[in-house]
Image: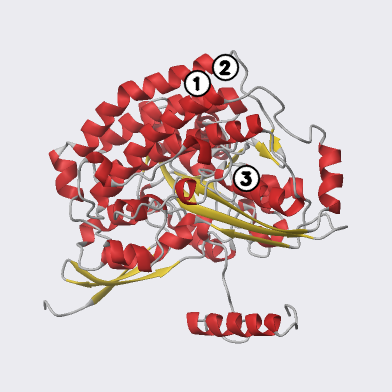
Amino acid sequence: MGLSSFKRALWVFHIATGSCNGCDIEIVAALTPRYDVERFGIKLVGSPRHADVLLVTGPVTRPMAERLKRVYEQTPDPKAVVVVGGCGATSGVFYDSYNVVGPVDAIVPVAAYVPGCPPRPEAIIHGVVTAVAKIEAAAAGEKR
Amino acid sequence: MPDQVYEIPIGPIHPALKEPIRFTFKVEGERIRGVDIRPGFAHRGIEYMGMKRNLIQVLYLSERICGICSISHPITLTLAVERAAGIEVPPRAQYLRVIFAELERVHSHLLWAGVAAHELGFDTLLHLTWKVREKVLDLLEELSGNRIDYAIPIYGGVRRDITPEQVPQVEAMIRYYRGLLDELLDAFLRDPSVEARTRGVGVLAPEEADSLCAVGPTARASGLAKDVRQDRPYLVYGDLGVKAITPREWGLEPRGDVYDKAVVRLLEVGQSLDLIERCLVEMPEGEITSFPKIPALLAYLKKADGEGLGWHEAPRGEVIHYIRLEAGVEEPVVWKVKAPTYSNLMSWVPMFVDQEIADIPIIAASIDPCMCCMDRVHMVDASSEAMVQKEELLRLSRAKTERICRGGGPA
């Protein structure tokens, strides 16, 4: 597995699968001057085909499950999925809904979870970095 | 082929959209001739879950209807439950709720201004507004303990007081934004490139706004002086004397375009600052809740019987919660939420018609849509693929009304 993309800037695609906007606005807050993730080379892109990391927010609603799977398949390897927020990790307060088929790891493999309702922007940055480090470590293990 | 009409689907996942929704545009060249909107992707069945949980749990659920309106929904729900159960709210708690509601309006309108600037391709302005927005988030964190989802209102009052030590911080925030507001107004409203991209774009005529029942800044930008805080005062808004802001306050005749929507929202930031300042001065000392102990509150609510309606002017417009409680049942028997975007959705249709494809993102953003607030009802007939149409729904609701009038009761 070639990991050259992770050695350079990390490009992130954000997909909301029925989230409440809380995590989504914290992701935008992470991009803007107070937290400014672009100084680490982390950048939000408009297409999963350009992305290294998928940021998934929200419990997965029934109509979004298939679309999440498709977005995951469109993302080129190597890739990492980071779940932002409690409801993506466990379905949270929405656990007993008829229209929620999540959590996210029931649909696509997840590399890192960022807990919180919503997590702080610092935690989101930490989550992205953790996921990438985990994939790099796994790839290094494969080589040996 | 200039007379050829093409269909362009946008969404539910698309870089121009922050939340899942699907538009199908009919375009002729660069011109939009029609639009079909398919919401429902963010529907989580919140009302259904609410009817299986006790009222305190419902309060936390209501906060997660939308992370941006996480004061508006709990305030409206508590107002509805307080009417249903006959609970009095101490005056200080009413002022505190107003302060938090207005802080939320400041953060939400600044958020919108940044998103709108981004949709115009003016990212410098996005970064400027989001940088200054952090100030109100810092204050909300200081007062409530969280940047988003504040858990402030509770049935009968609020959960946290503003201590005398915190008051100077609130005042400092007001001064900070007052000093910046002129700069922001300059950057948005006196900038020739912003004006060129927003003037005459996404026009909603006042008659259309009226007939399509638009609410909030979307209606006010078209010149309708509609504001729940003015028209049906609740909490202490009656004493504060809120006036609906239309572009006339900025010395312009309302045209209902994207520019006017920016005017209304930015001026409302100033209005909210004034309201917070007045609340700080006029707020009496005293209790912040009529039920300091949660078990006592739950026991009281379990005995309550009745129905209540709560309304509130959220940053995006009027939000309504309806609740029905039955004695001996912990869960609400009925809980219905009507979020502002639900009312504003149909105003997209006239706004998009005859506009250019390049203006889709800013027109879509101009009503400040909130899908997760809106995606409440999703009727699917399991026996067939067909969706239930408006006529059918109307027929069903008329039949039900007749049945109730005849004394049959709801089926």
Rendered view: B338 above or below B287 = below
Structural crowding at the residue carrying mark 3, measured as other residues with C-alpha within 10 Å and reported as few (<14), some (14–19) or many (≥20)? many
Observer able to see residue B267: yes
**Chain bearing mark 1:** B
Residue type at tag 1: Val
Same chain? Circles 3 and 1? yes
Does label 1 lie on the same chain as label 2? yes
Which residue is painted at 53% across and 31% down in the image? B99
Give me the C-alpha separation between circle 2 and circle 1.
Answer: 7 Å
Q: Secondary structure at mark 3?
A: helix
Residue at the spot of label 2:
B166
Between discs 2 and 3, the one toward the N terminus: 3
Q: Chain of mark 2?
A: B
Instruction: State the residue at coordinates (52%, 34%).
Output: A124
Q: Position of residue B332 (x, y in %)?
A: 75, 58
- Mark 2 element type: loop
- Whole-angstrom CA distance, mark 2 to mark 3, is 23 Å
Q: Which residue is mark 3?
A: B74
**In the image shown, does B107 or B36 lie closer to the viewer?**
B107
Pick whichever, B151 or B75, lies toward us: B75
Q: Which amino acid is tagged 2?
A: Gln
Q: Earlier in the sequence, mark 3 or mark 1?
A: 3
Residue B170 - label = 1
Residue visible at 18% across and 49% down? B197
Residue B242, image x and y in percent? 44, 40
User: Residue A52, image x and y in percent?
Assistant: 43, 43
Q: Is residue B346 above or below residue B183?
A: below
**Residue A130 falls in which quadrant of the image?**
top right
Q: Look at the numbered disc 1 and give the secondary structure of its residue.
A: helix
Quadrant of image for the C terminus of chain B: bottom right
Relative depth, front residue between B65 and B392 = B392
